[in-house]
Image: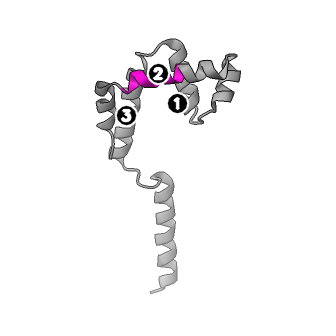
Amino acid sequence: KDFGHESDDVLRDTISAAQVLPDETTPEKGVDRSLFHEDLKDMLKILEEDERRVIYARYGLDDGLGKTVTTVAAQMNMSKSWVRSQECRALRKLRRPWYEKRLKEHED
């Protein structure tokens, strides 16, 4: 047997599998991540519109890129203190026990 060619095939299969399923991604984790995002979106509905916009921008919930207070303030044409106060108010609401419990259900 020519082991060189077999090991090339194994390596190629491993690389292909890694591209399809990134580190530690399983179908179960994908479903849980999807459920987590649905729960999070439901929870964010309790926030006022400004609070929700700040949270989405600060934590990158739309585009995956979190932004600084300064950047969010500039984008929203508001002061940094206003952005901080909106963020604090929103986080205070989201830290209520029943919401916190709902998110902790998704922890591994």
Percent x, y of residue 30? 38, 42
Instruction: Confirm or deny contact between disc 3 and disc 1 (CB under 8 A).
Output: no
Kindly identify which residue carries mark 1: 61
Q: Which residue is drawn at 44% across and 87% down?
A: 1
Instruction: Identify the image quadrant of residue 39.
Output: top left
Residue type highlighted by circle 1: Leu
Q: Mark 2 points at which residue?
A: 90
Quick check: is 92 in the magenta stretch?
A: yes
Gap between marks 3 and 2 measured at Cα:
18 Å
Residue sitting nearer the eye, 59 or 32: 59
- Callout 2: SS: helix
Q: Local crowd at mark 3 within 10 Å, few (<14), some, or many (≥20)?
A: some
Distance (Cα) linking label 2 and label 1: 14 Å
Q: Residue 30 has which mark? A: none
Is residue 76 positioned above or below 9 on the image? above
Mostly what secondary structure, the magenta segment? helix
Give the magenta-colored segment's residue range.
Answer: 86-95
User: Which mark sits nearer the N-terminus, 3 or 1?
Assistant: 3
